[in-house]
Amino acid sequence: MADTPHDGTGTVLRLGATQYTVTNIVIQYTDPNADAEKIDVSHLGLTTGASILTQDKPLQGSTKDTGRTVQFDYLGKAPIADASTGTCSITIGGTAIPGFSSLPFTVNACTLTLATNDAIKGQATLRVARV
Amino acid sequence: MANPCTGVTVTWGGSSLQEVVDVKIVAGGSLPIGRDSTFALDAGTIEIACLHTANVSLAERGLKKTLQFTGGGLECSTKAVFQTLNVAGKVNDVARYSAVYRIVME
């Protein structure tokens, strides 16, 4: 069978020493300095083909906001305490995703869902450091 | 083909308005009255929003000058009176100025 480099099987997520049985992981990188985060000051005087003009916002974002989050779904009955901190590792087939080896994190949010005739499922969102 | 609204210059009494971002021209606010087929009580208004204060200030209020638009499909020149100035400030944004001019038929 052909190797499928984008296959996510064998993915392991650990928070500290605790390994979670995860069913879904979403890693989001957002550049706080991206143009989309700036003020559009383009005006009618610009000529066709000119670049959109942007200007930095006068206020800076919260220093806590790194622009990087990891959201994952897991099976288990233990909620992950909000605001808890530690290090996060995500590996695929034993190899860490670049930048995700012992990455400092803070838990933004965690939900635990208990439903009839279903496994107990949790979902957590981590704010991870820019390293 | 539609006109891209770019390369627009706006002058008020010959002086440029800077960083104009929005223009709304409503020509004709009421029907002509009397024997004169062109005279009307309300000739219409022009609203200009910009990000720069050059020539857009309360000092201009009540003055009658020529308001001229060129480029971007906005070829227009008319006498107008600077009627109102609206300044909007918002957190983490730039100040935005909006001026309303009353068109004068002469």
Image: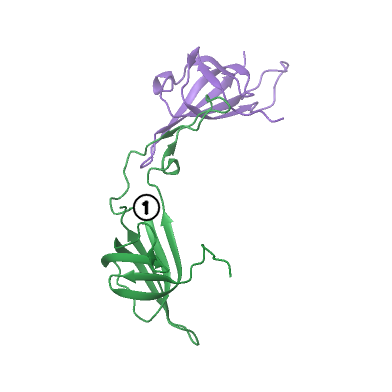
Q: Amino acid at mark 1?
A: Gly
Would you identify the image quadrant in which residue A108 lies?
A: bottom left
Mark 1 surroundings: few (<14), some (14-19) or many (≥20) residues within 10 A: some
The location of residue A5, given as percent across then percent down, is 51, 62
Residue shown at the point (41%, 20%) measured from the top left = B54
Say which quarter of the image contains residue B39. top right
**Camera-side residue: B97 or A8?**
A8
Instruction: Identify the chain of the residue marked 1, using the numbered disc in the image.
Output: A
Q: Residue furthest front?
A: A1
* Residue for point 69% across, 26% down: B31
Q: Is B89 on the left or on the right of B104, as rendered? A: left
Q: Nearer the viewer, residue B84 or B36?
A: B84
Number of numbered discs: 1
Question: Where does the C terminus of chain B fall, quadrant-wise?
Answer: top right
Report whether B3 appears left or right of B79: right
Q: Colour scheme in the image?
A: by chain
Front residue of B73/B36: it is B73
Task: Quadrant for the N terminus of chain B, please.
Answer: top right
The chain letter of the green chain reads A
Where does label 1 land, which residue? A67
Residue A55: where, in percent of width, then height? 40, 34
Residue B36 vertical placement versus A127 (above, below): above
* Rendering colour (chain B): purple
Q: Picture coordinates of residue A46 (x, y %)? A: 53, 25
Examine the rendered structure and indicate whether residue A93 appears above or below residue A41.
Answer: below
- Residue A111 location in percent, x, y? 39, 73
Who's the residue at 57% across and 28% down the image? A49
Find numbered disc 1 in the image and state the secondary structure of the residue it sits on.
loop
Q: Tell me: A68 left or right of B39.
A: left
Towards the viewer: A95 or B90? A95
* Position of A98 relative to A90 (above/below): above
